[in-house]
Every structure is written in structure tokens, then in C-alpha cells.
Amino acid sequence: MNFLKFFFVLAALNAIIFPALSNNVQIANLTKSGSTISFELSWENSWYAGIEFHDAVWIFVKQAPNGGPSWTHANITSAIVGAGFTQIVPSDEMGLFVRRSINGNGTATTTVTAELVGLTGAFQDIKVMAVEMVYVPQASFYAGDGASLGRIASGADVLQPVHVTSNIASLTCGNTAGDIQYASGTCQTIPAGFPKGFGKFYCMKYGISQSQYVDFLNCLNRPQQENRVSSDITGSTVTNIYVLSNTLAPDKGNAVRCDANIGSGNVTFYCDNNQNGVGNEANDGMNRACNYLRVTDWAAYLDWAGLRPMTFLEVEKASRGPLSPVPDEYSWGSTLWTTPGTLENVGTATEKWTNSYIDGGISTFTKSVIRLGANAPGTGASREISNASYYGIIDIGNNPGDFFVGKSHVGTFLDESGDGVLSVSGDANVSSWPVFDASQLNPVKISSQSDGISTLNFTISGNNANGGGRGIRSDF
């Protein structure tokens, strides 16, 4: 499994402009006729080994009526794909999944024709976006590992995990084997409506990339942009041009920036790891994980993309699968980890640590973020070497940390995907999600030397260098 690749195509009617970015997920030969779009889709290192083990691509579309400057969501009502593949259009029509339908692995290539609704204006510019996902099937699993700080545990024994066998039943605080408790803090009953992880869902194969977040920012209007970066961009000039780290230069691997002179209109953002003022070059870090995200940034991106946050129980299921817990394990199924060496091929599509591919996951807790999936050498590598979960999801809680919905929000979060539309201030506004506050301490899964996937008391606040994340979708 390779690194996350993200690609979009901008088309004004049938005039197609391809950005200078080569990605693993490729959309080519886009055409538009009325409300119908057609294109070729391909992605590397795809697999299908039966319905329980496969990857997919989540595709969603944004439109700019009459050429912009505003971008809005375009729903997809139906789609057709080529032989050997299948498509899934969710009931809310926010996008579509494309996956293999027969056993195979390697590069997947198919055609896609999709029908759009909600188009406005005399003509539209179109951005087609694609994100690699991994399927997590409906299955029972164990939550809690008997060792991690703050973990969930069986009500009968704090050293035993909870066996989650239903999405419907509540998990009640108590002192019997069917109850739950936590290793620290006050126990809160988990209500029936809280997503417990038993059901099926698709999870982003990798965390949000820096190029993904740049594309997100460039689809927002100026007031929304001002709230989705940490630097002050309210005036016509910017001092700390690296807008997520709020610094003059890239920090901890984050290279998302804007120009120093930005005027009063929408700001154009780009990646510039080599600091030469030319955006999105081959060594500018576009394929790196996006860190320095605040929890509000993470939630806004997921709402805009038609995804939703993972809960702490879904993180454990996505990482461990149906296996019995290993005390203090990381998402790759063991307690083995390796301190990063130095970076090779800095900022490029082949960036990696000098000590990649050795026994034990690379923990980036104290280092720079790097290319997503940089530790995965290819087919046949172990979970530990690839930093892979049971299902093939890469770097959960690592490169950087992953935000999740923790136990403090069990009464205020429901299984509802984003609707592609943010508030006027650029915040997520899904009614069944908690009101996230960037100044608060927020739970994050992070693979440090002492925190595994069952840890529930690790928190960060503000634009911390370890703030990152991914999303899931269970409506399909």
C-alpha cells in the first residue's frame, strides 16, 4: 500500500485544466455534457479479496457557478462504472464510492459516468475530488486492552476488554461482565445512538494530506478561510505566511502557505516546502500528512467532504479488527516502534525515513510529519513495517495523531455524515455533531512511546503540531 494520493480536475464546461500534480488517485479525460460528467479513474495498490477486505475511492464534486469565485457542493444521483468494478451512491447523494467487484490487486482502472444535480449558473467550473478509503466490515470486536491509560474496560474487571457485539444496544456503566467502566474518570453510559463501531464503514486509508487541505482552503470564501488557518490573514498582508503552523517557515513538516500580499479577496494557498515562492513543486511536501490542524479544522474538512469523525470505539475496531487486544498495542498490532532517522528525498513523492521498513512502526511523535504511507514498502510487508491496521488502514494515530470523538461526547454525537456545506464562518455545522472548540482539550490518538490505540486520556489543544485526522462514512 502506497501513500495517500489526492487529485482534482478543474473543468470549465469541457475545457479541462490539469494542475501540475501527479497523484496515485488519477482522474483523467474529464468531459461534461449538461449535468453528466465522465472520466477515467485509476489508483495504485488497490485490492479486493472478498467483500470483507477491499479498498475503494470516495468521489465528490464541487461546482463554481459562472466560474466562481464561490464553490458549492454538487450532489451525485447515479453513476455507471466499467466491468470489474461497482459503484455505490449513498442515500444522501453526497458522492459515490468506486471499488473492485472481483478479486485482484495492483493498479485499478475504470471509467466513471456520474449524473449531477443542483448545478446553478449559466455554466459551472467543476472540481472532481477522490480520496482512497478502506472498508471495515460489520463485525464484533474488543475495545480496551487492559493496560492503556483511561481505557474502556469490562465492568467486571478493569483488566479485561469490552466485547462490542451490537451497534444498537447501549453500553451501560456497572460492575458486571455486560457493563462497562473506564480505567480513570467518571463512567458514562454509551447510548444506543452513539456509533460503537460494530457496523460497517469506510475509513480514509490515510490521514488528510497537505494538498487535500490546500484544495479545501481554496474552495472557501475569505471569511471561512480566515477561520481555517492559524495565521492572521484578516488584512491585506500576512507576516506568518506558513498559515497552519503560524510561522515564517515550514515547521514540523507543514508547508501550507500563502503569499505575503493577499489583497482583500479569496486567498490562494499552496504547498512550498522548499521556500522558493513557487507552489506545488515536486519537493514541496504535497503528499505529506497535514499536521497543525485544530479540531475545528478537522471537523470542517470532514463536513465539507461528506464524511464524518470516527468515535473512539471505531478507532479500536478499525485498528485491531476482530483480534484479541495486545496490551499497549499501536494500530499496527504490536508494541514495537522505531525512532525516526533522517529524511531522504525531502518533500517529494518518495520521501521516507532512512530507517524505514525495519521491524516495528516508525513513531513520528517527536519528529516532522512526512509523506503519507512512507513506511509501507509495498506488497508482502508486515503490518508493523507498513504501520498498517488489521484492515490495511495506514498510520492510525501516527504521522501525526488522529482526532476522534471521545467518551465526553457519547451523548451528543450521532452517525450522520457531513452535508458538504459549512457555516458562514467556515465551521462544521452538522446538528448531531458536538460543537467543537479549538481552544478546548480534545482527544487524539497518537502513537507515542506510551500511548497506544486504547488510550483515552491523551489530549491536545489549539494548533498543536500533532493535530491531524481522517474521516469515515457509514452511510452507503
Image (cartoon, rainbow, N blue to C red):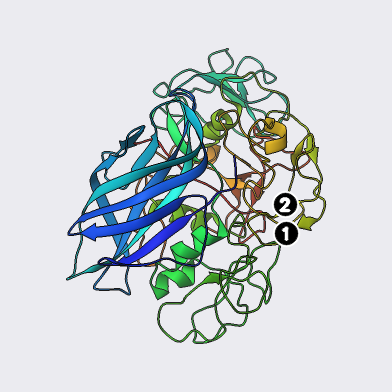
| Kind of element beneath mark 1 | loop
Picture layout, residue 56 above or below residue 469: above
Q: Earlier in the sequence, mark 1 or mark 2?
A: 1
| Camera-side residue of 182 and 470 | 470
Across and down, in percent, residue 333 comes to 68, 28
Q: Secondary structure at mark 2?
A: strand
- Say if 109 sits above or below 174 in the image: below
Q: Hey, which quadrant is residue 82 in on the image? A: top left
Q: Residue at x 65, y 60 (%)?
A: 348
Expressed as whole percent of the image width and height from the top left, the position of residue 370 reads 68, 55
Q: Is residue 110 left or right of residue 272?
A: left
Going by the numbered disc 1, the residue's amino acid type is Asn
Left or right of 366, for residue 259: left
Give residue 286's mark: none
Disc 1 to disc 2: CB gap under 8 Å? yes
As drawn, is 83 to the left or to the right of 252? left
**Residue at left offset 20%, top offset 61%:** 119
Residue 325: where, in percent of width, then height? 66, 22
Identify the residue under disc 1: 345
For marks 1 and 2, give the CA distance: 7 Å
Q: Is residue 114 above or below residue 423?
A: above
Residue at the extreme top: 177
Question: Looking at the image, which is closer to me, 116 or 69?
Answer: 116
Which label belongs to residue 352? 2
Left or right of residue 389: residue 122: left
Front residue of 69/190: it is 69
Q: Say which amino acid is labelled 2.
A: Lys
Percent coordinates x, y for residue 356 in the rendering: 76, 44
